[in-house]
Amino acid sequence: MVYQTLFSTILVAMIALITTHAADCTREGLLAAAQTYLSAQTAGSPSTLKLSASNFTYQQNNKVSDISKGLLSTAYKFDLSRSTADTVACASYSMWISTSGSKPFVVGTQIRHAGNNTDEISMIDTIAATTGDLFFDAKKTLGYIKAEDWSNINSTASRPSRDVLKKAGDAYLDMWTDAKAADTIPWGTDCERVEGSALTRPCGGSLPHGGSSKPNGMRRYVIDEVVGSVDVFCQFDSLGAWPDTHEIRIIDGKVKYVHTITVMRGVGT
């Protein structure tokens, strides 16, 4: 009887442990899944990815597409790549730049996982800019971003909160419709803004203060407090229904970096 009771107690504890583990969306799992995406892209082989069999979507430049016919089906050599992770949304953001070949690219990709299961990918959402897109020059963009510091913020007390990061991302996209939005963003005096290949330093210069009646919609977020960043995918309706990603990094309470990738032609492949 004692043995049965002990066995039952151990079994219940093991089930609870397994259930809890399955429900966790970890930073390590997200970054590992992001790395499988980056590896698949360099190989041009989406078949190497573990995609959800029942609920998978591939979206490229805000349009649901066939993954076998998208950017992932072509191999690209990276000059730079990096990823951030959002354990609350169970999503990651990866940015890569390829300057070689006849068609250079600057790409941002959000990867999402259903049910907090980082072993399977439920969505790959890509914004891919190439020659002809807004301020596009992959080599210039590479030069600017390679010089940046994207190391983790080790002190938890120094990390911006999720709320602060989301508000900064939303305020930035609201600048085209809200005359006061730009003034709510905590601009750093040494921040840099890279829009395509256009560099603005400091970030707070030459900003819009309203003027458009169309808000930038279709917003999808990846927020990483450890890095201090928010990435927002959207449709840039204020200027022309363009697929767009804006990434902002906040250090010591101030905006340090802003990156934008904007596609002007609809589908950038």
Image (tube, rainbow, N blue to C red):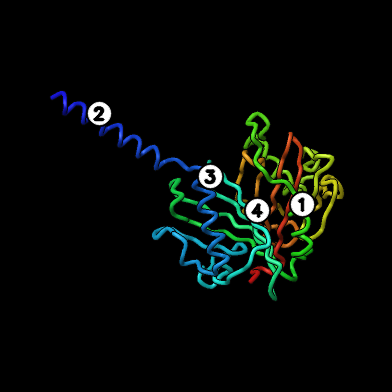
Against 257, is 80 above or below?
below
Occupied quadrant, residue 153: top right
Q: CA distance from mark 2 to mark 4?
A: 51 Å
Q: CA distance from mark 1 to mark 3?
A: 29 Å
Q: Which residue is mark 2?
A: 9
**Left or right: 13, with 250 as reference point:** left
Mark nearer the N terminus (3 vs 4): 3
* Label 2 neighbour load within 10 Å: few <14, some 14-19, many 20+: few
Q: Look at 52% across and 48% down and name the residue there.
A: 30
Q: Which residue is mark 3?
A: 89
Image quadrant where one finds the N terminus: top left
Mark nearer the N terminus (1 vs 3): 3
Against 53, is 265 above or below?
below
Q: Nearer the viewer, mark 2 or mark 1?
A: 1
Residue 217's disc number: 4
* Label 4 neighbour load within 10 Å: few <14, some 14-19, many 20+: some
Mark 2: amino acid: Thr
Mark 3: amino acid: Ala
Q: Look at 68% across and 65% down and name the residue there.
A: 98
* Label 1 neighbour load within 10 Å: few <14, some 14-19, many 20+: few
